[in-house]
Image: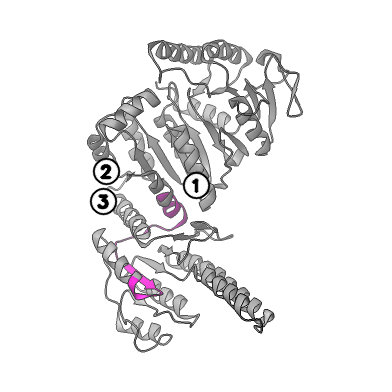
């Protein structure tokens, strides 16, 4: 249901950046939702005022506990409601009397269950409208607002501050993806488990994120969309300035049945939805992991201005399969001019490929990879570079040195340590140089790591506009690049 846009944005801002929070149903009993949420908020470093509400306690987590929200002696911006479903209407009534601006209703047992649950959901919406409370949920896993130091979900992942907002109609899927984002170095501006969306809808969140200064990329997991025309109109507008990536659940009959029992959602025809998204220029993901891989690329790299790709690879095989993948995904791998062949060739043995892909033939010349990438970046004949196998060699060096230490008692510890340090420094220098080149030429450089490392997909570069992005497989790198190129093409073809 529509509400004045400016008022909606102001209220959502108060929810996502609250000065004070009431936890109605807070608990210190391990395993209860009231304990999950309360301990996460406190441990996550929330700096505002926190008021646990539970009539059975006097103190909790070192904080005084109040019997009712009305007993809190200060104003409250946001309430988390973690009490049984039948008590939620009364709690919201009290919140309204207290002047609370927003409520995150964690509790389930509403529209996702039966007719009685649907009736109860309508009742709490009616109270929210009457009392001026904006309700997130019900049946939600919570929210994460990193720029407010607010981590309030059932799982205790704490992704770093970043530019990717994630709105999910599935709390569990959302929690899994926020945890992956933390592991892969993908920074979030906001996470909302939107639950049943009884009052605040996905479209409302899009309108808020449109003006949010911290958000550059928006990812959505949807099982259904109410007010489809309003959603598409809003998404088309927002997508012009902030790419929207959508994963639609309920593509199949089995998925639609599961969605109805999960959030009470009636999931529409997938082909129609995808066609509408294509018209709006929205990026469609088919599996959850794509939300992350696409978010990493879109949030950390400049957009390619075309579909021409330069490939630099440590070994020939990877270059071959990457060129095949590019061809399959509508990207071209153009031949490179003689002048560039000559410049790169000064750093390679005469038997190198002398073409695109640039096969570095496993060279130990530390300048060769950077020279190859820079020569291609300077050339107007390519719009993006894929670099394979340079990042990740450091782990192979570590494995080699481990074997040497085990089998050669005469090996110099000082020399081995020097080699180790040089390898690590070179990789850091290479990643930093790639960031410098992206700023200089406004073209993306997408990496594929030689090994699976603990450093994550995204490598932030302090002081740089862009970050290093290193995927685990060539097909992932090519897929992301193809989607970014298609998004840029859509922008160019649909001006305004």
Instruction: Tell me how the rendering is colored.
Output: one colour
Q: Is residue 77 above or below residue 468?
A: above
| Residue at image location 55% in from the left, 12% down from the top | 87
Q: Along the polypeptide, which appears first: circle 2 or circle 3?
A: 2
Q: Position of residue 152 (x, y in %)?
A: 58, 33
Q: Quadrant of residue 118?
A: top left
**The residue positioned farthest toward the bottom in the image shown:** 350
Q: Do the residues bearing badges 2 and 1 touch, measured as CB atoms within 8 Å?
A: no
| Left or right, 221 with reference to 331 | right
Residue drawn at point x = 47 percent, y = 37 percent: 174
Instruction: Tell me the residue that label 2 is attached to.
Output: 278
Nearer to us of marks 2 and 3 is 2
Residue that mark 1 sits on: 180
User: Is residue 3 visible to the viewer in this orientation of the structure?
Assistant: yes
Query: SS of the residue at dot 2?
Result: helix
| Residue 493 - label | 3
For marks 2 and 1, give the CA distance. Answer: 27 Å
The region drawn magenta spans: 294-317
Number of dots carrying numbers? 3
Depth check, front residue: 152 or 419: 419
Q: Quadrant of residue 425?
A: bottom right
SS label for mark 3: helix
Whether residue 213 is visible: no
Mark 2 or 1: in front is 1
Q: Tell me, yes or no, whether the highlighted magenta stretch contains residue 246.
A: no
Q: Quadrant of residue 92?
A: top right
Task: Give the left or right position of residue 241, taking residue 192 as reference.
Answer: left
């Amino acid at each position: 249901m529509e509400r004045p846009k400016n008022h909606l944005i102001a209220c959502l801002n108060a929810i996502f950046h609250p000065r004070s929070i009431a936890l109605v149903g807070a608990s210190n009993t391990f395993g209860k939702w009231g304990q999950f949420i309360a301990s996460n908020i406190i441990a996550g470093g929330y700096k505002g005022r926190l008021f646990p509400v539970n009539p059975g306690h006097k103190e909790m987590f070192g904080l005084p506990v109040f019997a009712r929200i009305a007993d809190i002696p200060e104003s409250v911006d946001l309430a988390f409601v973690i009490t049984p479903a039948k008590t939620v209407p009364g709690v919201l009534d009290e919140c309204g009397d207290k002047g609370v601006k927003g409520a995150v209703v964690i509790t389930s047992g509403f529209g996702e269950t039966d007719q009685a649950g649907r009736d109860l959901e309508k009742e709490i919406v009616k109270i929210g409208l009457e009392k001026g409370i904006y309700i997130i949920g019900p049946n939600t896993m919570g929210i994460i607002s990193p720029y407010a130091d607010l981590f309030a979900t059932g799982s205790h992942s704490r992704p770093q501050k970043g530019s990717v907002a994630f709105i999910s109609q599935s709390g569990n899927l959302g929690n899994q993806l926020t945890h992956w984002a933390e592991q892969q170095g993908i920074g979030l501006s906001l996470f909302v488990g939107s639950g049943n969306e009884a009052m605040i809808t996905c479209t409302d969140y899009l309108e808020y994120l449109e003006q949010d200064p911290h958000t550059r990329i928006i990812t959505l997991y949807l099982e259904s969309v109410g007010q489809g025309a309003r959603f598409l109109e809003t998404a088309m507008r927002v997508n012009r300035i902030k790419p929207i990536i959508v994963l639609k659940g309920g593509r199949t009959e089995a998925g639609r049945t599961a969605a109805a029992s999960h959030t009470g959602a009636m999931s529409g025809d997938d082909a129609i939805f995808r066609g509408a998204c294509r018209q709006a220029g929205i990026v469609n993901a088919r599996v959850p992991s794509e939300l992350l891989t696409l978010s990493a690329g879109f949030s950390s790299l400049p957009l390619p201005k075309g579909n021409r790709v330069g490939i630099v690879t440590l070994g020939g095989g990877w270059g071959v399969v990457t060129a095949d993948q590019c061809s399959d995904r509508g990207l071209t791998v153009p031949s490179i001019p003689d002048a560039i062949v000559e410049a790169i060739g000064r750093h390679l043995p005469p038997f190198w490929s002398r073409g695109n892909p640039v096969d570095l033939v496993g060279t130990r010349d530390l300048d060769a990879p950077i020279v190859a990438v820079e020569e291609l970046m300077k050339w107007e004949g390519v719009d993006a570079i894929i670099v394979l196998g340079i990042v990740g060699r450091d782990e192979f060096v570590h494995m080699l040195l481990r074997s040497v230490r085990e089998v050669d008692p005469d090996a110099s510890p000082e020399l081995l340590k020097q080699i180790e340090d040089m390898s690590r420094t070179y990789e850091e220098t290479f990643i930093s140089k790639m960031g410098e080149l992206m700023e200089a030429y406004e073209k993306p450089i997408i990496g594929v790591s030689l090994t699976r490392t603990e450093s994550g997909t995204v490598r932030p570069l302090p002081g740089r506009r862009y970050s290093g992005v290193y995927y685990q497989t060539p097909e992932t790198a090519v897929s992301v690049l193809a989607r970014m190129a298609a998004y840029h093409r859509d922008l160019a073809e649909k001006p305004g």
